[in-house]
Amino acid sequence: MRTLNKLIDALTNHLARRNAPLTDNSVLKILQELALKDCLLSPALNELAFDNFNEMPLEREDYSIGFACNIANNSYILAKALVRKGKKTFLFWEPNFTDYYPLSNPVWEDIEYTADTEPKSVDFLLKKWVQPDFVLKANYGLDAEMEINFDYEEMRNRFLGAPINISDSPLLFLKLHSLLHHKEMFRLFAKADVLHVSGYMTGLASLTEKPYVTFPYGSDLYTLPFQNDMRGWMQVQGFRRANMHIATGKLMLEHLEKLGVSRKRIALLPFMYDTDLYSPLDNNQLRDELKIKYPGKIIFFLGARQNWIWKGNDKFFKAVAKVKDIRDKAVFITTWWGQDTSKSEVLIKELKLDSSVKKIGVCSKPSLRKYIDATDVCVDQFTLGSFGTFSLESMSMEKPLLTYFNPEKHFNFEKEPPILNALTENQIYEILSSVLDNALNIKDLGKQAREWIKSYHSIEALWPEYDKVYKTALNDFRGKKIG
């Protein structure tokens, strides 16, 4: 009866507000809005609202994309670039939940900032930032009132369908994933035709009546779905119910298949990046300052966080120590943040590299772009075998890149990436020696790197393939099953 009264009130208000006749589509729209206001917790209303949704017409070339989960600003960068290219795109931003981390705040991408230590929040920078129209903010409602009959056994079986040991309180699920807490995000989801989701949003998307494409970034696929708790079960459901998946490396493809995802639903595609934003800078004052400060030296820039397991920073410092006879020809500028800064600090002192390694703390992306542009060689990781964002940024800005790349873990590109490829300490040492002896034309290598990135990672090169994925997800949602 409560639902029926709401429906009557909504239809009455529609007539009063718009002075327009009710049509099938307008009734359907009101029902959908009501379902979202009820956070999809009313099964009868939800079924009524979305029963014929698959039959709603869609202009195939004019669909809209909603990006959700902005880890490392990847979604913001893509959305902003697609908007610039004329695509109807939104970023659904939840800064006090999944996007709480400073490096996941769009302001970190747009406003110049440097500091000795990583800030706990960058809200103080928001005063300098104009929020773009395509960025829509959702508040995570920690104060939401909840009246939910929670059947733990039913919820457990729904998410995974297998008996497990109960180790978490049901309140954990309610705290992290309650639809009431995320009601603003669900309302934003309604604005897009197809969702592009990462992180925790993968699980939440599975509870909507929207087609969605997963875009895992790492731990949301490698570890979270394999946790024996409610967050893990929800993530499994998110991947299994998705209409399509974009895997940006072979390792991701393997993990998706481990979760039972059909290979037909997985598109193995390189990470699409904004090569217009990340391009050589004009009139970069920092470049002149560093040349004056370090005259005649080759300047290396280390952009990865200090994490020995994932980045292999210790290997690089040990290799630098080995080139002691010609080390004076170089300076090594490094960002300084991450889990292993203390360990790296001790290692640098033990290797007597204090005069060679210059720490700059943390810097936002505008500052990072200036450092990439101002230096001669960029250095990333020596463990993963794939390209992270710093690798793509460096190559796109026409810089030679020293990192580890393994096509068996990442991609078999038609043309191998023009990089300084090294995995072991000795391999890094050999490349450092060649660079410092001027045996390599690093400027030419940088030019090749930018041309390669434009061919294999730019929006111009990859959009047709991404476009196919989103359209396939839309078609699948409307009943044209993939298999």
Image (cartoon, rainbow, N blue to C red):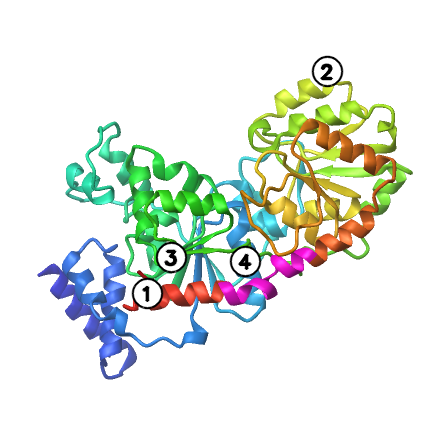
Residue 223 placement (x, y as % from top left): 41, 36
- In depth, the one of 145 and 466 nearer the eye is 466
Residue 423 placement (x, y as % from top left): 65, 33
Nearer to us of marks 2 and 1 is 1
Secondary structure at badge 4 equals helix
User: What residue is rendered at 46% in x and 45% in y?
Assistant: 252
For label 4, the residue is 78
Nearer to us of marks 3 and 4 is 3
For label 1, the residue is 476
Q: Main secondary structure of the magenta part?
A: helix
Q: Are marks 3 and 2 in contact (CB under 8 Å)?
A: no
Left or right of 380? Residue 174 is left
Secondary structure at badge 3 equals helix
Nearer to us of marks 1 and 4 is 1
Secondary structure at badge 1 equals helix
Q: Amino acid at mark 4?
A: Leu
- In depth, the one of 119 and 125 nearer the eye is 119
* Magenta extent: 452-465
Q: Amino acid at mark 3?
A: Arg
